[in-house]
Amino acid sequence: MTPERRVMNPVARISLIAVYAVLCLAATGRASYQIATKFAEAPLPYSISAVSAVLYGVIAVALWRGWRRIALIGSAVELIGVLIVGALGFLESSWWPDETVWTGFGSAYGWVPLLLPLAALVTLVRARRVEPIAGPAAP
């Protein structure tokens, strides 16, 4: 039996890398500004924006380098974060004196923060195209 490896659709992979990289830059800019100018006003939301920026960067690099497991875990963490922050924003709005990237389930970013981890998870899990790994010929 020949060893096999799973390969992600290259168009999907590059698209995910591009979107994650753009979100990383956007969230980094937003968090940097918020933390530098008004961190004392809303430390929790601004810290969450910074965490989301780091997470977007980690996922983009993981996808670029082919670290499927890290990308899968990062996307799952991202989805959980978006769902928790989005829900808490509606349930306990006093905790959110200002917006984060994930507030309102990412509505300020066109719901991309909600849809992106879903797309990433589906793409990563569906990476079922199997290619044989070159090796010694079977007897």
Image (cartoon, rainbow, N blue to C red):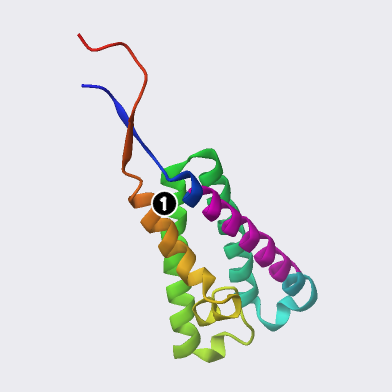
Q: Residue at x 52, y 55 (%)?
A: 16
Q: Quadrant of residue 64?
A: top right
Q: Quadrant of residue 99?
A: bottom right
Quarter of the picture holding the N terminus: top left
Locate residue 72, reporting x and y percent. Answer: 41, 51
Locate residue 107, reporting x and y percent. Answer: 55, 80
Query: Can you identify the residue that label 1 sits on?
Result: 72
6, 117: nearer the viewer: 6
Locate residue 88, reporting x and y percent. Answer: 46, 83
In the rendered image, the residue lying farthest to the top is: 139
Locate residue 86, reporting x and y percent. Answer: 47, 80
Quarter of the picture holding the C terminus: top left
Q: How many marks?
A: 1
Q: Check disc 1: other Cα within 10 Å, few if <14, some if 14-19, many if 20+.
A: many
Q: Is residue 11 above or below residue 119?
A: above
Q: Residue at x 80, y 76 (%)?
A: 37
Q: Is residue 42 magenta?
A: no
**Residue type at tag 1:** Leu
Q: Residue at x 64, y 65 (%)?
A: 50
In the rendered image, the residue lying farthest to the right is: 37
Q: Is residue 130 left or right of residue 109?
A: left
Under tag 1, what secondary structure?
A: helix
Q: Is residue 111 left or right of residue 5?
A: right
Q: Is residue 34 left or right of residue 131?
A: right
Q: Is residue 27 magenta?
A: yes
Q: Is residue 124 above or below residue 23?
A: above
**Magenta region, residue range:** 13-32
Q: Is residue 32 left or right of residue 102?
A: right
Q: Residue at x 41, y 45 (%)?
A: 69
- Magenta-drawn stretch, dominant element (helix, strand or loop): helix
Q: Quadrant of residue 130?
A: top left
